Image: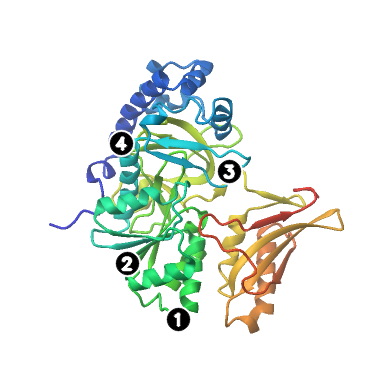
Amino acid sequence: MAESPYWNPKTETLARADLERLQGHRLRRLVERAYAKSPFHRRLMDAAGVRPEQVRGRADLERLPFTTREAWMEEQRRRPPFGELCVIPPAAAVRYHTTSGTTGRTPLRVLDGRADWKWIAECWCYGFHGFGVRRGDVVFFAFSYGTFIGFWGAHYACEKMGCLVLPSGNMTTPQRVQLIHEMQASVVCATPTYALRLAQEAADQGIDLAGGPVRRLILSGEPAGSIPATKRMIEAQWGAKAADTAGMTEIGTIMMFECAHQPGGTHIIEDHFIEEVIDPESGRPVGYGEQGERVVTSFGRRAIPLLRYRTRDLVVKVPHSRCGCGRGFDLYDGGIRGRVDDMLLVRGTNVYPRAVEAIVREYPAVDEFQIHLWTKDGIRDEITLRCEVRSGFEGQWEGVARRIAADLGAATEGLGFGVERVPAGTLPRFELKARRVKDDRVVKGGA
């Protein structure tokens, strides 16, 4: 009998009506548990005038108040170190994680119990199995294994599936490339940026990645995993298929994954989450095909209930029928498209770093880049794209730079971009989330 393409065939192929009934049942249990055991959530619901018995199904979800990152962090500040979201005592926890890239001095702290950890790995299994990873694959993790949640759950998911796992911990990039090559890894897990960095290092070592055994790359941590130009570049350099995934420290695992059909978007794991898309300003829901902010309700995490958490991620939800894989799970077209709060304002013009990357990655002459914002003569914002030129393209650079500047200007209402070449190795490389914006303006967003 042929092996199923689904990790959980029963729920992944449910009809929408049956899936929504399942979500409603799990939502009722979640709300009851959160109200009974989490003083934080009880206070929120009481302030909103909502009782658990009023939430009987999916249709009642909007009765519940939003949870925000700001409220969570304020709760931890007032009642350190974890606040009163957590419904298990710290002594019952088995994992501690913090967010990466946190604003302020104190990170967002998270605890997980044993049941949480089983569930975290289970959700990752949906993504790995759905993209074709199987027992016997050799899976390499380009990951530092710190307190950032990152690929921790993915590591244990691969062990659960029967794969051979290659952790790389604090290895250098050259050492990681050597391990991939020597152990004949068939799957590599990395951020999109670091996948490109590994490919660059392999070329420097004379290793033919495209002709090697790696057949699949699991990408996470950056929106670039769903940017077509970036994905094409990664797949060309590795000679492998690349799949986008996305998760959060707040929920502990991934909530979406790209299946083997590569439909141009990521399936939402809807038997474990309810994902809403709202207008960031009004908080009202938006329909299929409209961009908005994703709001997540998580059923599986036992230690920290998560209800209507505003993620600040920008997404466009489309129906499950967009993909021919047979899953009943809706998709986010293009994965996570950016952030509500990462927009740059330059001389009155909105600039989205993700949109800049989508253009720059169309040019193979660009090896690495950085968006530099600065103030000219103390009064005028300027924006410059700093680029390292890939070996072999030096003679073409002047023409390429002119075309990039024209493309960027056309995409940003005529905003003038400077495009400059910097020496190879000048710009930073990233293992985890890339930070390609350097803002040196006197007044950020000023005219």
Residue 261 vertical placement versus 65 (above, below): below
Identity of the residue drawn at 43% across and 67% down? 176
Q: Is residue 439 left or right of residue 112?
A: right
Task: Please provide percent x and percent y for residue 286.
Answer: 51, 37
Which tag is nearer the camera, tag 3 or tag 2? 3
**Colouring convention used in this rendered image of the protein:** rainbow
* Residue 19 image label: 4
Residue where numbered disc 2 is placed: 186
**Which one is earlier in the sequence, the residue at label 4 or at label 2?**
4
Q: What residue type is labelled 1?
A: Gly
In contact (CB < 8 Å): disc 3 and disc 2: no
Disc assigned to residue 206: 1
The residues bearing labels 3 and 1 have C-alpha atoms spaced at a distance of 38 Å
Residue at 53% over, 51% down? 337
- Which of marks 1 and 4 precedes in the sequence? 4
* Amino acid type of the residue that numbered disc 2 sits on in the rendered structure: Ser
Q: Identity of the amino acid at label 4?
A: Leu
Residue 307, horizontal then vertical, whole percent:
45, 30
The CA distance from mark 4 to mark 1 is 50 Å
Q: Mark 3 points at which residue?
A: 102
Residue 86: image quadrant is top left
Tell me which numbered mark, 3 or 4, is placed earlier along the sequence.
4
How far apart marks 3 and 4 lie (CA) works out to 35 Å
Label 3: how many residues lie within 10 Å, few (<14), some (14-19) or many (20+)?
A: few
Q: Mark 3 and mark 2: span between their CA atoms?
A: 34 Å
